[in-house]
Amino acid sequence: MEELKEEEKKSLNFIEEIVEEDLRSGKYTSILTRFPPEPNGYLHIGHAKSICLNFGLALKYGGKTNLRFDDTNPVTEDTEYVDSIKEDIRWLGFEWANEFYASDYFEKLYGFAIRLIEKGLAYADDSTSEQIAALKGTPTEPGKESPYRNRSIEENLQLFGEMRTGKFKDGEKVLRAKVDMASPNMQLRDPILYRIKHALHHRTGDKWCIYPMYDFAHGQSDSIEHITHSICTLEFATHRPLYDWFIEKLEIFPSRQYEFARLNMTYTVMSKRKLLQLVEEKYVNGWDDPRMPTISAFRRRGYNPESIRLFVEKAGVQKRDNLIDLALLEFYIRDQLNKIAIRRMVVFDPLKLVITNYPAETEWLKSEDNPEDKDSAQRDIPFSKEIYIEREDFMENPPKKFFRLAPGQKVRLKSAYIIQCEQVVKNDDGGIKEVRCIYLPESKSGGDHSGLKVPGTLHWVSIQHAVTAELRLYDRLFKVEDPSNEEGDFKEYINPDSLHIIRSAFGEPCLKNAKFDDRYQFLRKGYFCLDQDSSEEKLIFNRTVTLKDSWGKENKKN
Ligand code: ATP
Ligand code: MG
């Protein structure tokens, strides 16, 4: 029994251990976490990690999670982002207890700042940002005090009030905390609490012209909401003493901050600033371009939320930064899609095949939608005298072990018959115009009594019944594993072949009825889903993922 407990403990991540201890010791009776996105871009797979962690903890320990928009920077924020963030969290499968906005706390935060001034712990500083930086010192050298540091409480109260009422221009003054200019922790060298910014805010409009800085807004918002465990990424570890300083001096609810490593993934970039550049400079077609690492892009590309949650969980909760292989995410997607995807035949690059001994009529053949599913539905596929096969599935002079079609060779057409190639008809330019075959009527799939075993099975479509579709084949967006860590601009490492479009592929007629939620496996080709650009006139499919990890193989070869 004890051993079992030990085992369970080992499988907990370090934050779960802290939470369990806090509940066991009675420090808290229930936990409250929060997910605090800044609405200045779309959520990416890194955010998914934070979402799964915060919401996951609350679900596991019977607590709650708030969604709090950290909207303290008026210039970069937008309601479009707010809406997309909510949609993405819900799509991932989570629901928040409360929807809050840091901007709703502006009045309270202002009050907190006044309280600090009254305690002699904050002051208005007229220095320019350059002057402040010059006095800040270095990690090994203490900073120097600002000439404005010892203003009286009354003067500070008056100046801060005037900052609020708009007496000063942007940058003319800031409010700083009076902590310690000689602290070895640079974050404690009189951090800025408020700056002046005459800008419209997406929620408060022109009500405010002073805005709180991240450190002042974030921790105090946690405290206002009584967040028990405030989980953030490692780069904020050095901010923790300041987080605690505010709580102590303001005597407010003691939220606690814990840091974990960001999730980074190979062959992409993960900072919103960089993703925004890709969008604005049109390297991709918007935030939800299926090549992006955003949640909305994954959704459009046909990934399902389960696979993203599994991936994020597998990546673990670490205390050291790491780079997770995109192949792991693709592994989970494939695994899920293999179970649920409906099988269809689509010819990407057609070669005409005429079955000379087949009557001029249509026969409807049966095939299973998904052989992985024992309750799979069946569909009808039309078979006729003229069909398309994949150009690469035929060779006039094949090498040994080419188990596809070649003169004199036999193959099976999936769910249909065995055929044998009799003749190759050429164009004037020597290219192959069509291939002529005979079929073996006794070899019909499901009732085969030909006694023949052929090694190859090809996908095909009947020409007169085929529907045409555009296919969008995606590859990795970058040529190198970690573009942010290479010399020069990350955009130099963009993969120029990350999108390949096939304008007209030929598919089974039932694809006409494809729905956005359907997941397909185009036999021998990959997993696909209908793209949102698709219409009745024009079918468009995205390749979600290839059938196998061909990159892995290629890399091994090299
Ligand atoms: P970016 O650097 O991509 O702009 P951010 O940290 O500025 O990200 P926020 O909107 O502030 O973006 O993030 C909301 C929450 O998601 C924060 O708690 C942040 O720590 C977390 N988060 C952001 N990126 C990652 C990541 N790559 N891995 C894990 N958590 C992340
Ligand atoms: Mg941020």
Image (cartoon, grey):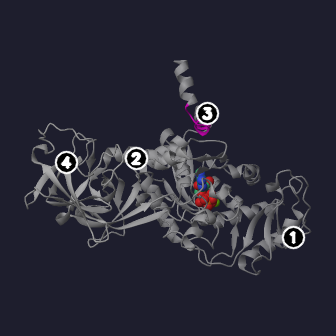
> Few, some or many C-alpha atoms within 10 Å of disc 1 (few <14, some 14-19, many ≥20)?
few
Tell me the distance, in whole angstroms, between the alpha carbons under discs 4 and 3: 59 Å
Q: Where is residue 429 in the image (x, y as percent from the top left)?
A: 32, 71
Q: Could you say whether the residue bearing mark 2 is in a helix, strand or loop? A: helix
Residue 129 versus residue 220 in the image, above or below: below
* Res. 334 mark: 2
Separation of marks 4 and 1 at Cα, in angstroms: 77 Å
* Residue 173 appearing in the image: yes
Q: Which of marks 4 and 3 is nearer the N terminus?
A: 3
Q: In the rendered image, which residue does mark 4 sit on?
A: 415
Q: For the residue labelled by badge 4, is the local secondary structure a helix, a strand or a loop?
A: loop
Q: Which one is closest to the eye, mark 1 or mark 2? A: 2
Q: In the rendered structure, which segment of residues is drawn in magenta? A: 11-19
Q: Quadrant of ligand 1?
A: bottom right
Q: Which residue is drawn at 51% across and 57% down?
A: 476
Q: Which kind of residue does numbered mark 1 sit on?
A: Gln
Q: What's the distance in space between the residues labelled 1 and 3, CA to CA?
A: 46 Å
Q: Name the residue under label 3.
A: 21
Q: Distance between the residues labelled 2 and 4?
A: 24 Å
CA distance separating discs 3 and 2? 38 Å
Is there a contact, CB below 8 Å, between mark 2 and mark 4? Answer: no
Q: Is mark 3 on a helix, strand or loop?
A: helix
Answer above or below: position of 502 versus 392: below
Q: Position of residue 68 (x, y in %)?
A: 56, 58
Residue drawn where x is 84% and y is 71% of the image: 130
Frontmost of labels 2 and 4 is: 4
Which mark sits nearer the N-terminus, 4 or 1?
Answer: 1
Residue 296 in the image: above or below residue 161: above
Residue occupied by mark 1:
131
- Mark sitting earlier along the chain (1/2): 1
Q: Let me know if residue 223 is in the magenta part.
A: no
* Left or right of 491 on screen, residue 443: left
